[in-house]
């Protein structure tokens, strides 16, 4: 990678069972690719590129090919497009510049070594190649190549934070104004520790944490996301001008970290993963003392209200979720999902006399199935949770609500929990089993199984 972060010079060498093509997964990748020269033994004859495939016919083990990728000086799609420059840094999806080896339809594993300019740092989702002499050599191939990911190049501060055996590789890109690295690292560590308390472990053994100070927005984290390509990753686009008190109170970090509790779930059913994260963003802030349990209930309740208001009688949750990006009905999807998670949590506690909970189900899931290199359907994930809890709680809720056009009916749960809406406020009935259940839910994190 050159100093301007615009130009990759790539040398791809083949060994083992030969791939028959290098394939790019982003439509724009082809327009960034410059001519591909074949092995020196052929005099560097140009290799044919058809659409998103570089054909490797006639190459033998030991052959190397060379090509260049030129990225534009500026991208226009914004943070979510997978290509962005902030200050002197480049944040870009590998799908735009990396051409992946395939043999037929089977992706071939490979080692990637990156050389970056002096003074630059690198943030990647991939596991380091263990036997590699170079520190910037990575193993690719365990996860589907087409899964989204981000790589960042630029001046940055980096720290590997260990949370109960898991390693978070935190990269904070340089920004203007400069961000407070120590305070932000602490904030992330505390968030990770709050998640860890849910069942005593962090859900995955390692994660890329990329923090991009964009210096704009009117909240601490205007945009956050979790990606799974090449490894588990949390990306936080922050407004570093906001005070640290605002970061600590904000829910976004807790929401994104909570996504690590579930595997990659196909994007037809966003209510499931977004519901899980929206539920725990509140529960975990209460159990780690960032907000009071009452505040957490109020925020959940406010979310359910927004979800209810965003429900339209003729459209099912499945339908609305499937088209969420175009219909923008995020509230219906996220908070229906959170309501379903509250139902699962209370139902498991009730039927097991408190031995089980949503947290214990997710703990069992971690033990069987995380980290996961493959995608899961919603139903497959829920069936597994049923199997692990020896119940039908999860598929039961799926059957009741996934195709319902009504917002999940929380009246029975609210009465179990002693919660009552009065005007604009939420009223708590203070005694007995209701108060105990409320406390148990909001103290989830301090009572690991
Ligand atoms: Zn989310």
Image (cartoon, rainbow, N blue to C red):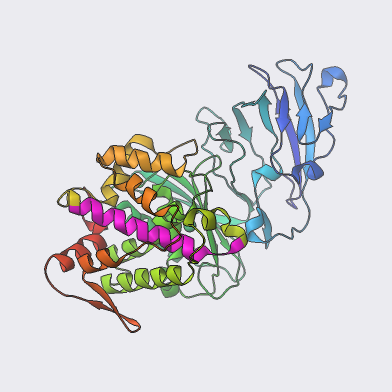
Question: Is residue 182 in view?
Answer: no
Which quarter of the figure has residue 287? Answer: bottom left
User: 187 or 330, which lies in front?
Assistant: 330
User: 150 or 55, which lies in front?
Assistant: 55
Range of the magenta residues?
327-350
User: 343 or 280, which lies in front?
Assistant: 343
Residue drawn where x is 32% and y is 62% of the image: 283
Residue drawn where x is 17% and y is 48% of the image: 352
Q: Is residue 133 left or right of residue 366?
A: right
Tag count in the figure?
Answer: 0
Residue 334 part of the magenta segment: yes
Question: Is residue 441 in view?
Answer: yes
Task: Please determine whether, in this image, residue 159 is positioned above or below residue 296.
Answer: above
Q: Is residue 122 left or right of residue 441?
A: right
Residue drawn where x is 77% and y is 17% of the image: 59
Residue 190's x, y, as percent?
Answer: 36, 60
User: 71 or 199, which lies in front?
Assistant: 199
Which quarter of the figure has residue 438? Answer: bottom left
Task: Please determine whether, in this image, residue 94 is positioned above or below residue 349.
Answer: above
Q: Main secondary structure of the magenta part?
A: helix
Which quarter of the figure has residue 418? Answer: bottom left
Residue 74's x, y, as percent?
Answer: 76, 59
Task: Say which quadrant the N terminus sits in.
Answer: top right
| Residue farthest toward the front in the current orientation of the protein | 314
| Residue farthest toward the left in the current orientation of the protein | 432
Residue 423's x, y, as percent?
Answer: 33, 84
């Amino acid at each position: 990678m050159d100093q301007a972060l615009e130009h990759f010079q790539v040398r791809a060498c083949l060994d083992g069972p030969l791939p028959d093509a290098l394939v790019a997964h982003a439509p724009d990748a082809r327009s960034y690719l410059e001519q591909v020269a074949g092995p020196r033994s052929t005099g560097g004859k140009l290799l044919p590129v058809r659409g998103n495939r570089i054909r490797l016919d006639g190459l033998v083990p030991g052959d190397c090919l060379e090509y260049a990728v030129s990225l534009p000086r500026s991208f226009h799609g914004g943070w979510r497009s997978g290509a962005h420059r902030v200050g002197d840094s480049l944040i870009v999806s590998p799908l735009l510049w990396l051409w992946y080896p395939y043999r037929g339809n089977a992706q071939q594993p490979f080692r990637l070594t990156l050389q970056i300019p002096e003074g630059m740092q690198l943030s990647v989702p991939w596991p380091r190649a263990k036997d590699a002499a170079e520190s910037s050599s990575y193993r690719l191939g365990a996860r589907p190549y087409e899964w989204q990911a981000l790589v960042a190049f630029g001046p940055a501060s980096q720290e590997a934070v260990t949370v109960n055996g898991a390693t978070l590789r935190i990269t904070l890109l340089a920004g203007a104004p400069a961000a407070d690295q120590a305070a932000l690292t602490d904030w992330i560590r505390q968030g990770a520790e709050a998640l860890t308390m849910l069942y005593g472990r962090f859900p995955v053994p390692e994660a890329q944490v990329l923090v991009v100070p964009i210096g704009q927005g009117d909240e601490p984290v205007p945009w956050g996301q979790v990606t799974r390509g090449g490894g588990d990753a949390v990306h936080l686009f922050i407004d570093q001008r906001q005070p640290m008190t605002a970061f600590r109170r904000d829910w976004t970090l807790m929401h994104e970290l909570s996504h690590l509790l579930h595997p990659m779930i196909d994007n037809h059913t966003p209510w499931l993963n977004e519901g899980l994260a929206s539920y725990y963003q509140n529960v975990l802030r209460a159990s780690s003392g960032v907000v009071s349990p009452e505040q957490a209930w109020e925020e959940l309740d406010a979310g359910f209200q927004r979800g209810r208001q965003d429900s339209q009688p003729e459209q099912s949750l499945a339908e609305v979720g499937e088209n969420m990006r175009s219909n923008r009905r995020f509230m219906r999807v996220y908070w229906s999902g959170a309501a379903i998670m509250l139902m699962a949590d209370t139902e498991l506690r009730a039927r097991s006399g408190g031995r089980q909970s949503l947290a214990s189900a997710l703990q069992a899931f971690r033990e069987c199935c995380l980290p996961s290199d493959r995608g899961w359907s919603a139903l497959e994930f829920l069936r597994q949770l049923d199997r692990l809890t020896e119940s039908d709680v999860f598929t039961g809720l799926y059957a009741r609500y996934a195709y319902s056009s009504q917002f999940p009916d929380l009246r029975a749960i609210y009465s179990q929990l002693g919660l009552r809406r009065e005007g604009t406020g939420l009223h708590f009935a203070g005694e007995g089993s209701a108060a105990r259940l409320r406390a148990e839910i909001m103290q989830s994190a301090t009572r690991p199984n």
